[in-house]
Amino acid sequence: METEHGSVMTPVFMPVGTSGTVKGIHQRELAEDLNADILLANTYHLYLRPGMEVLQEAGGLHKFMNWDKMLLTDSGGYQVFSLADNRKLTKEGVIFNSHIDGSRHVFSPETVVDMERIIGADIMMALDECTPFPCDYRYAKRSLELTHQWLDRGVKRFNETENQYGYEQSYFPIVQGSIYKDLRIRSAEKISSLEMDGNAIGGLSVGEPIEELYSMTELVSSILPGDKPRYLMGVGTPVNLLECIALGIDMFDCVIPTRNGRNGMLFTAGGIINIKNEKWKNVFSPIDPEGTSFVDHSYSLAYLRHLILSNEILGAQIASIHNLAFYFRLIKEAGEKIRSGEFITWKTKMVKKLATRL
Amino acid sequence: METEHGSVMTPVFMPVGTSGTVKGIHQRELAEDLNADILLANTYHLYLRPGMEVLQEAGGLHKFMNWDKMLLTDSGGYQVFSLADNRKLTKEGVIFNSHIDGSRHVFSPETVVDMERIIGADIMMALDECTPFPCDYRYAKRSLELTHQWLDRGVKRFNETENQYGYEQSYFPIVQGSIYKDLRIRSAEKISSLEMDGNAIGGLSVGEPIEELYSMTELVSSILPGDKPRYLMGVGTPVNLLECIALGIDMFDCVIPTRNGRNGMLFTAGGIINIKNEKWKNVFSPIDPEGTSFVDHSYSLAYLRHLILSNEILGAQIASIHNLAFYFRLIKEAGEKIRSGEFITWKTKMVKKLATRL
């Protein structure tokens, strides 16, 4: 995948930098220690804080946060729809109350494009309705029609507007349709027909059984064009990543490595560690002898356990860097195995280890 | 000041790493970006978490936290006495309830030495009673007598025990006496007579008027031997540091740069910034163009303001590193000015600037 802020080999994992920061990690660490190529930021959060005026005056998010590699912005649809009682859907767009101060705001497919132009991410996501799970067929169908109408309006606005900072931006549409095959097929065909630079799958990993996540992903993946990146939004665990790479996914984002890390869950090649567990109390060996990041070798499991149990900021910092480094290592290896023709064999072996509770 | 974990030029500022971590800062940043030579850790906090058993098995705090430069441990006296209603003083020692789970514990001058041997800091502090402010004369006098008795017992235990990890440890006594000149003189003379490697001044910066802080410091400083480090505990702001260096202080520790930093207060050569203030909203220039740390040049004031207002961990990380870098720069310059015979002139000019609200 190539943009004016660099290129990246797929499959790729994007750390979540919701408000213009990956929680607990310096940009220098993201670039130099983790070699992250692309981060995700969030239009909804950035709209509320620091606000579009500040971002425009800063010259966009890249400059504001001092990040000169790639950025992708989520449209805010998922966040707004998570507000449940605090938002109202209309044909025009969505009216919602801020989770910070309760103030009233309106997002439309057009204003979201305008905001994403101001934020200036290399990849902009369309505004969609992310349906909850469970979701009855009639609701899912009506919602999909709305999402498709919004998409047409968003694409129109995208085509009518220019980037603001002199580099190209892409606009990715999002397949919806809950867990209904016919809706997913219809949506995937609609999205494919737009011939955008890349295509996303949304509305999964919202509570549905894992089999549904995989079967919908496989179905949609088989329809979306293979020569453009397919992005599965909000997924997932290390096992989810490998399974979905097997189904044709190229791009992922997820808060799991950072959020679960802050709560003391560590992912390793041998399995999952709950660092709060008593068994790590006296384990003074490095966090991950095979780890690629400096934290893996600088700190012991016992020390990290102490920090997490004491609610020390450094615990969150260390666990987040470790988990992201592990995700990057895993996805990089997945790419190598794909290119060497050994992916499926490797994946089958890995998923067993990755899901082990240590 | 020389120890087996390195030497340091005085005056020196010690970042506070209460539980074996300077909040929000990696050890690599402390060593390589901030060039910190010595950190302070806290016996009370380390005793409760991770506990002495873990620290002993780790081979001491240096190894546990992966810090091979100098460490100093506070005795826990200040923390225990801050517990107010949750502790009881006896001649033997102090009985207290943990601030974490309410469990009952006892510290005595002897057990504190034993714990500091296990922690293995290069400099160990004696157990004292840190009197509150205000404190009536009779209480201060009785308290001082107890502190002196405890000190004799602590020195005895120190002399009867050995370091556990093969490098020498020092034991610093602490002058008390509240704001009463005769008590402070008596305490300073007692402490000087012990001829330990260094001497500390405690019981200040606990709410007394700043004039009392300075006059007690000057009085005690004039009695403590000049050829050994004089350590003023828990002080202070940049102005306090320069004023107290003028009064003969060599060592400082304080949570102000990190704690106030986390709350959005930045110290600079031009004065104090409250980053939450609206005026910084659109200031996209670097945090501190004259700053010595990477954060000063990597991030803007507007970005840091956004992070602090959004309660983002990275805001705490950046502000803490900036403030500590500024403290180090200030205290290093103070040392240079002392050696070049320009200190008082420079200090007079600096204190005006440092106290300015920007």
Image (cartoon, coloured by chain):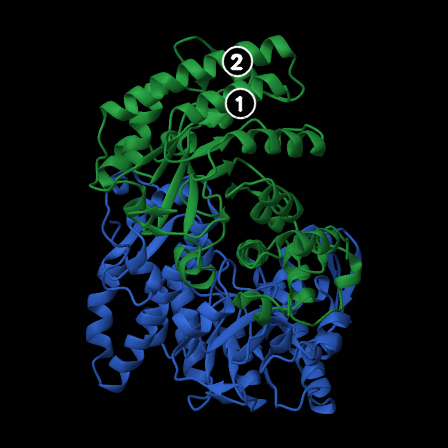
Chain colours: A green, B blue
Q: Are marks 2 and 1 in contact (CB under 8 Å)?
A: yes
Determine if marks 2 and 1 fall on one subunit.
yes
In this rendering, position of residue A60 left or right of residue B103: left
Which labelled disc corresponds to residue A176? 1
Residue A292 location (% of width, % of height)? 55, 66
What secondary structure is found at the residue carrying circle 1? loop
Residue A230 location (% of width, % of height)? 48, 37
Q: Nearer the viewer, residue A211 or B170?
A: A211
The residue depicted at 39 percent of the width and 47 percent of the height is A1
Residue A237 location (% of width, % of height)? 64, 45
Residue extending furthest toward the front: A341
Q: CA distance from mark 2 to mark 1?
A: 9 Å
Q: Quadrant of the C terminus of chain A?
A: bottom right
Which labelled disc corresponds to residue B267? none
Residue A133 location (% of width, % of height)? 65, 22
Q: Quadrant of residue A193?
A: top left
The residue carrying mark 2 is: A143
Residue B285 seen in the current view:
yes
Q: Nearer the viewer, residue B325 or A238?
A: A238
Residue type pointed to by label 1: Gln
